[in-house]
Image (tube, grey):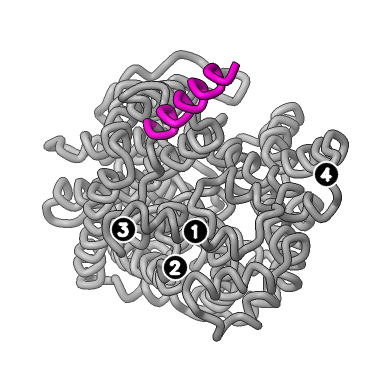
Amino acid sequence: MEQNTNSQEDDSMVTNSKEKKRQTWSRPWDFYMSSVGVSIGLGNIWRFPYMCFKYGGGAFLIPYLLTLTVIVFPLMILEVSLSQSVRKGLAASWATIPLFKGISIASAMILFHANFSYPVILAWVFKYLVSSFSSNLPWMSCDNEWNTEHCVSLWDPEKQYLDETNNASMITVSNVTNQTGQILGTSSAEEFWNYGVLRISNGLSEIGRLNGELVLYLTFIWILGYFAIFKGIKWSAKVIYVTATLPLILIIIVMVRGVTLEGASVGIYYYLKPNMTQLENPEVWIAAATQVLYTSGVCAAAVLTLGSYNNYHHNFIRDVTMIAFSNSFASFVCGFAVFSTLGSMAFRQNLTMNEVVQSGPGLVFIAYPQALAMLPLPQLWNALFFLTILLLGFDSQFVYVESFCAFFMDSYPRLRNFHKYSREIFFAVCNAGFCLLGIIFVTEGGVYVFEIFNTYGSAGWSVFLVATCEFVAVGWVYGADRHWDEINRMVGYSRIRFVVTLVWKYIGPAICMTISIYYVTAHSPLSYASYVYPPWAQAICHIVATSSAMCIPLYAFYLVVTSRKPWSQLRRKVNTEETKHENIISEEEEML
């Protein structure tokens, strides 16, 4: 019997010695660069310029910067400090507050929705990037197989479209309208987007056939993503130094070219023209909060997971401050690049800015490519633009996949240790699975499915509800002062303690909960272009949102019912902060 026990202990020691230790960043700036890669993405160029234009120009920057400072900055400090203090991933970080461990599952669900829906945008971008090398840009002519009899080319800005009564009609970015606003035709750029790229069906109920070309591009994106992360964070950090910095350089080049164009000042004026009366509209504040939360990567576990690879005493407050500034600066520069070029387009065609500015896909895939096509060497500028978009989205994609896979590998250590190449195998399986799930988005009705997951899966009221729970978990259940004592042990920083803990306990949960309620009560039916989703599709939207948010109360209920531990142990782990600190320091010394 004694011999058996000794052999089991020996086996256990051998197993433990073979376990792979969790990786840490090689360089002090790796965390900052990786977080910048997540926070600066498609949202900065896809949504921010239009939001700024729609909600008061320069006045929109007031709620945007306030939300960034008051909500997102303290929330990033909360997430990064939590994971850095335990130096483990999503599940282990929130396990320090057992009652709210469901937050880790909710964040993993948000990651799941983002991981298999987000890359289809990159597939669309890749299609445009390839098409940019054509001698004749396909979105500027009506001589292609996908064009209809209603197609109107905007290649010649002086060309006028005549209706049946021979009256000259106005050519806008998307449509050709007569003096009464009646639509007479569709622009060649919109037809390329709808019929050349999406091959769009009439609605969600008509999923239709696969788009073979987009399937190829989507598969290629996932293969590239795999090779960016399969060796671990020390390898992916090297990749992200390129994918995070190169797009910023490219967008600055595009901006410089844009501001030198004739009529650029028209666009810049409308971009920054302050309309202070818009601040009375609550939707402006909601839009600003949504934009900042969407682009920052909080509540989706990306920043939290990246923080778990830091050393215990890493100065994450400095990094979080620079990440917030970098995100705002990138959004501001993207707005200059977009609106200077669109202003030149409006000036050349004698149109108003309202007629050329669009949001989301309309801005990236219809309006802006048309504006760039009017420049000398249009192929060069379009290729630069879509390469920028591709890189902006690519680093966000593979960091999201890294975060999702790390959640499972930290929760089930055997996934990290079952084979010599266990990480490579597991990541390959995850990438292949997401690629297969993403096939639904490259069908004829795929864009309608994409809008559901883009609006409700990785954004919307569920994300604000998760943020509310994070504030309550740390601010009240775990204890704001208790957690800041841990931060003080890590970085010796207490100058902003009062303000940040005040946000954790009162301001943050109040604002985020209010926004969640507003989203649900002031709900308007989801639509894409002129298509309004039917009631059964609206139900699917809320099921998608609920799939993440409900993980938190369901897990808490399960824990209360099944656990026999006292309330004090459900609030926080028994380990004291001092013991945890000593364990982590000893681990670091052992690694050194």
In space, the residues marked 1 and 2 are separated at their CA atoms by 9 Å
Q: Nearer the viewer, mark 1 or mark 4?
A: 4
Q: Counting residues from the N terminus, which is met first, the one under dot 1 or under dot 4? A: 1
Indicate the amino acid at tag 3. Asp
Give 339 or 345, whichever is nearer the viewer.
339
Q: Residues within 10 Å of mark 2 (few under 14, many from 20)?
A: many
Residue with the mark numbered 2: 316
Q: Along the horizontal axis of the image, is 546 left or right of 415?
A: right
Screen quadrant of the C terminus: bottom left
State the residue position of label 4.
565
Mark 4 vs mark 2, CA separation in Å: 34 Å
Instruction: Look at the image and tell me whether residue 199 can be seen.
Output: no
Which one is earlier in the sequence, the residue at label 3 or at label 1? 3
Please name the residue that numbered disc 3 is placed on.
Answer: 30
Q: Quadrant of the N terminus?
A: top right
- Structural crowding at the residue carrying mark 1, measured as other residues with C-alpha within 10 Å and reported as few (<14), some (14–19) or many (≥20): many
| Up-down relation of residue 266 to residue 101 (above or below) | below
Q: Secondary structure at mark 4?
A: loop
Q: State which region is magenta.
A: 1-18
Residue type, mark 2 in image? Phe
Residue, disc 1: 84
Give, as a three-letter code, the residue at label 1: Gln
Q: In the rendering, at what x and y percent does residue 341 appear? A: 29, 63
The residue carrying pointer 3 sits among few (fewer than 14), some (14 to 19) or many (20 or more) residues within 10 Å by Cα, namely: many
Mark 4 or 2, which is nearer the eye? 4
- Point 37% across, 58% down: residue: 589
The reply to whether the C-beta atoms of the residues labelled 1 and 4 are less than 8 Å apart is no
Per the picture, the main secondary structure of the magenta-coloured stretch is: helix
